[in-house]
Image: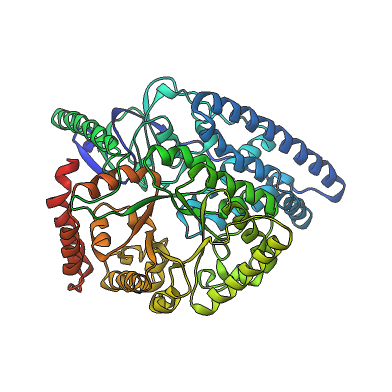
Amino acid sequence: MDSDRQREQVFKGIAASPGVAHGKVYLFLPKELDIPDDPVDESEQEAEVERFEKKLLETRQEVLKLQKEVAERLGEDEARIFDAHFLVLEDRALIEETIREMRDCGRNITYSFHKVAQRYIDAFTNMDDEYLRERANDIRDISKRLLHNLVGESHYGLSRLSDERIIVAKDVSPSDTANIEKGKVLAFITDAGSKTSHAVIMARSIQVPAVVGMRNFTRILNNGDEILVDGYDGQVVVNPSEQTLFRYGKFQEEKKSLEKKILAQIRRTTKTRDGVSIDLMANIEGANEIDRIRQYGAEGVGLFRTEYLFLNSVGFPSEEEQYQAYMTVAEAMAPDPVVIRTLDMGGDKFPNSVYRPSAETNPFLGLRAIRLCLENTDLFKTQLRAILRASKEGNVKLMYPMISGAGELDRANAILDEARNELSSNGIAFDENMKVGAMIEIPSAAITADVLARKCDFFSIGTNDLIQYLLAIDRINEQIAHLYEPTHPAVLRMIKMVIDSGHSERIRVSLCGEIAGDPVLVPIFMGLGIDELSIVSSGLPAIKYIIRNIDFTDMKRLAEDVLELDDPKEIFSLAEAFYKKNVSHLIA
């Protein structure tokens, strides 16, 4: 590509952290560690176990030091990334599995740990949930650090960066960036990753742009290449011309002006120009996100994912541990609502040290979410008691995931009644009027939404799974991912059906999932009659600004028009045209 290096080229990825940066490339491609596979006989195995335990302790001390340094430089939120590392290092199940692997295969402890860690990484990499899929990087990162210590090589990461550069890497781990000087990084670009990857978390933390999902970009560039990074639209310009640099300079000034406009409206109600209100809520994983969602103007928590408590626990978290986590969020958000989703785990999500699902031909159609809980009532009831106890501390609502029909809902509510009775008999207070709802993310639930609405206080439409199950599309299968179409007529009609069923029983209907925060599609959902949107916190300001500056009557007309169409691409084109006419000029 040397002949192309003098001309401007534009590449497209996933916009992950806003901003524009111009500078030279630092190509970060750490070499693969050479893992020895020397045989060990029985007489040497105990010494290998002792060496393993010693290196686990050394690695833990290293990470503790890194965490303290990151907390001092970047803050406690960024430092919490290392919490998952400690859990891996202290996971006795993983440790015992490594020792067992060594005894079974007769190879050294380094090789055995590498094999076991890779199994864990593969399990998380194949998860459907984007956030949890990215947690494979936590395991990969701490495993790499421990392997370096076992082999006897130092791990430097990006600590040797000498001047201001744009980092281009296959991926970036917490260890890679732990000792990096804040002023040395202009932007991050990664081949892999998503909007929840560590590179993105770091970029947002130090307020630099990031573009991820660039596939084989690291193969195209050389150290020192001049590039421009557009973190707003996910574009990277190689060898930008003077004209491009001037245009982006003006563009960045306009974006900063827009951000001021958007931030000026953060504290205002989410209401259209003609007076129709909608609640704009945030999706969270834990209490550490409360300050951020408050800063972005969230009107409550529409989805509190509880899986992270289980995945970051050596053994299932106790009732008290769960209560403390739920209570902290409920108190911090009061009087705004907090919707706590019960455990959505199994199939693609499981705590690696506790629950081992049996081999399933298709785990996404297997024992997961509410099905797993109904088969493990002690586990389920423990969580329900913790949520009930937290309900007295704020405006808590409880939500069941993956309900397929009335039978499952009835069984779940029966266990909830048992949990209530147990607390009452022990004199433990809770909100006896706590609202209970269901996620509508399986076609059978959507089709019987009229029945479920009579048994629920609210609905939340989980679009990620609903679209996947409705269209029979695996979103993480690159060969067919293009068929995952949120504007498919079946998807929009089913969403409309659920909204109408809920409203007929006077219950509110929320929309969560990636498309709930899509500026082009939000006007359609509002026009269909959705009462609430629950999205990632970073998307809240822009969505609020858009809603406040357009009319509901126009959105309703748009929704009526798209329901008459039968081509997903035509529907998207109509939504895009509406966006350009009514919205894009607001954020141009």
Q: Position of residue 34 (x, y in %)?
A: 60, 41
The quarter of the picture where the C terminus appears is: top left
Q: Please identify the quarter of the rendering in which residue 253 is found.
A: top left
Q: Position of residue 527 (x, y in %)?
A: 23, 62
Residue 138 visible, this orientation: yes
The quarter of the picture where the N terminus appears is: top left
Q: Position of residue 249 (x, y in %)?
A: 19, 28
Q: Please identify the quarter of the rendering in which residue 465 is found.
A: bottom left
Residue 356 visible, this orientation: no
Would you say 358 lies left or right of 261 here? Answer: right
Q: Residue at x 68, y 66 (%)?
A: 421
Q: Nearer the viewer, residue 100 or 516?
A: 516
Q: Please identify the quarter of the rendering in which residue 319 is found.
A: bottom right
Q: Residue at x 53, y 26 (%)?
A: 179
Above-or-below relation of 468 to 215: below
- What's the colour scheme? rainbow
Above-or-below relation of 267 to 127: above
